[in-house]
Image: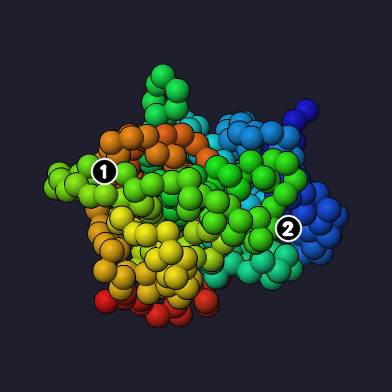
Amino acid sequence: MEEKVTDNKWLAVVNPNAGVKKCKKDWQKINALLKKYEIDFEPHFTDQRGHAIKITKEYLAKGYRKIISIGGDGTLNEVVNGIFWQKCVNPTDITIGVISVGTGNDWGRTFGIPTDYEKSIKLLKKEDTFIQDAGMVSFANGPGTNLRYFINMVGLGFDGLVAQKTNADKDMGRGNVMVYFKNIFMSLFAFHSVPTRIVIDGTEANHHLFSMGVAIGKYNGGGMKQAPDAIPDDGLFNLTLIKDMSKWSVIANVNRLYNGTIGKHKKVEMLQGRQIIIEPKTPVLMEADGESLGRSPFTFNIIPKSLRVVINKEKFLKQPPSKHQ
């Protein structure tokens, strides 16, 4: 007879390959801490890309309403897609907690989620939640069009190429800060700005663009503050456009991405909108929450206040407002 799922039981979706197999190495420690804090959970391990989507859909159908994503931003992205693709429960009736084991952990930076396992498990125990926006993007992938949901940020153009190279390195067991910066440097000489048509809530503009970020959260790329003014429940995307900037200017201004002043650069424009259409003249790559997915053209739609997530209430609510101007 199948065990009845209680309201307090968590489904733990565990990606053993997260953090270049760090999750596999640390699983016994994480498992012991979950038990120490009397978290009632059932673990299920992913074995390939996309598996967390399937696990999430399957166990929501079995009655689970609380999910811990144990892995990186890509694992969390798959859990979120599983939640939106299933049809048996409203997404806001599901609670998502995160134990970060990846190399980026950018979603958690906005919400003050620590990378320390014990501290993040204490947050699961407290279960302070926040209902954030989500985004949906349609994109080309081969002959057709695909849809993907995301909860942090999508990077296009230069960012998409860097992510593709970095994810290929991760698949080969190579993944650290030095590998990421190597891929930034290599991509600088491989990518060129592209004439791009952008439509934001019906208003059209045309630019030569080097990089584009469509954001709900503030961070991407392992701590780059590419959308410093993003508010994750305001019903708006924050769009960061980096225009035709020279390779050396990009290198000289990397610090602006980390300290949140990128919007002060004369070749950077920051906009907001609920629906964003991006049509580069030549195809560019996309990454969503760190996952390399497909090519242009892209259409983004905001889904306001659609996901309930466990946050670090003290740190998140104390964050000062950030204005780049």
Q: Of the numbered discs in the image, which one, if any, rests on residue 87? A: none
Q: Which residue is painted at 26% across and 43% down in the image?
A: 196
Which percent across, then down, holds residue 120? 66, 66
Q: Nearer the viewer, mark 1 or mark 2?
A: 1
**Disc assigned to residue 196:** 1
Q: Which residue is mark 2?
A: 39
Lower position in the chain sequence, tag 1 or tag 2? 2
Left or right: 1, with 56 as reference point: right
Identify the residue shown where x is 30% and y is 39%.
280
Find the residue positioned furthest to the left. 203
Secondary structure of the residue carrying numbered label 2: loop
Question: Residue at the spot x=61%, y=33% of the render?
Answer: 50
Where the C terminus falls, by quadrant?
bottom left
When the figure is inspected, residue 52 is found, relative to residue 321, above or below; the finding is above
Q: Is residue 96 visible?
A: no
Q: Nearer the viewer, residue 202 or 269?
A: 269
Q: How many labels sit on residues?
A: 2
Instruction: Decide which of 183, 14 is in the foreground and name it.
Output: 183
Instruction: Estimate the x, y position of residue 257 in percent, counting from the top left.
Output: 44, 68
Residue 9 falls left or right of residue 325: right
Q: Give the CA distance from mark 1 to mark 2.
A: 49 Å
Q: Position of residue 230 (x, y in %)?
A: 36, 64
Residue 182 showing in the rendered view: yes
Q: Name the residue: 34% across, 48% down.
A: 193
Name the amino acid type tagged 2: Ile
Amino acid type, callout 1: Thr
Residue 251: image location, x then y, percent: 47, 65
Q: Residue furthest top?
A: 143
Q: Is residue 181 left or right of residue 288?
A: right
